[in-house]
Image (cartoon, rainbow, N blue to C red):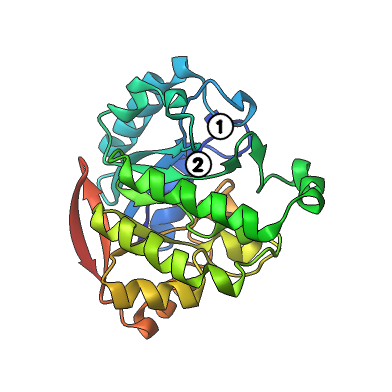
Amino acid sequence: MIDLHNHTTRCNHATGSMQDYVKAAIAQGIKYYGFSCHAPMDFDSKYRMAKAELKDYLADIEALKMANPDIDIKSGLEVDFILGKPHLMEKEVLEARVDHLIGSVHFLDSWGFDNPEFLDEWAKRDVKECWELYLDSIQAMAKSGYFQIVGHLDLLKVFGATPPKEMDSKIEKTLQIIKDNNMVLEINTAGLRKPIKECYPSPSILKLAKKLGLDITFSSDAHALSQVGAGLKECIALAKDIGFKAGVVFDKKIPFHVAL
């Protein structure tokens, strides 16, 4: 089993020790376990580690690797990509000696659309316009060349705003851009425990990704011990049903395939 995207208390909205997360992963038979906590950025600092913590965060992962030889622990960071604001990404983050960087879009301009604190903003927005901007953001993120993994591709649907039918061609174009830039699509189980009650991305998008020849990986996006590995077996079964034969893991940003 593969689970590459998980958080730590350094992001200020997760609970549980890193060692306990590793123990939970081992208990579930997870072979490749990645910490990919929210990277430091001079924006929305309430929900991410401080820049001064980055060195200690990476050192903690290295110590866990040494202390837990029965599981392959991977180091990563989840990096927010905000369209038109590439200067917000820290040089130390983009050049960090990690196994993978996950590029994620959580913001349309300054609006954190997946944060329940700002749920009322949805009433002021046009869903189609939101999807246009969101997919533009994903495309620009993929073209940046900084990242190995696309985080929770259709996160915008979290509260029920699924993409309108007229977005189908742009979704396909976005997937092609992701493939052209050698990025891997994560199947993220967090959506199963959110209001949408569906993995990211949706089964229909995954079927299109398979048709286009994209590679996949897996994550539970855990912010609590009870979420470690949650939904992974279900999503691996879904991937196999669609026709995927392997998941991708990274070692110092070099991909290798693991049979499902």
Tell me the SS state at disc 1.
helix
Task: Determine contact: label 1, label 2, CB under 8 Å.
Answer: yes
- Above or below 230: residue 108: above
The amino acid on which the numbered mark 1 sits, given as a three-letter code, is Cys
- Residue at position x 65%, y 69% from top? 197
Tell me the SS state at disc 2.
loop
- Structural distance between the alpha carbons of marks 1 and 2: 7 Å
Image quadrant in which the C terminus is located = bottom left
Residue 36 x, y percent position in the rendering: 42, 41
Q: Which residue is mark 2?
A: 7
Q: How crowded is the residue under tag 1: few (<14 C-alpha within 10 Å), some, or many (20+)?
A: some
Q: Which residue is mark 1?
A: 11
Q: How crowded is the residue under tag 2: few (<14 C-alpha within 10 Å), some, or many (20+)?
A: many
- Above or below 247: residue 49: above
Q: In this orientation, which residue lies closer to the viewer: 33 or 97?
A: 97
Q: Is 27 left or right of 47, judged from the image as shown?
A: left
Residue 209 x, y percent position in the rendering: 36, 71
Residue 178 x, y percent position in the rendering: 32, 56
- Residue at position x 49%, y 38% from top? 83
Q: Is 77 left or right of 195, judged from the image as shown?
A: left
Q: Is 128 left or right of 177, judged from the image as shown?
A: right
- Residue at position x 34%, y 36% from top? 64
The amino acid on which the numbered mark 2 sits, given as a three-letter code, is His
Residue 246 x, y percent position in the rendering: 25, 70
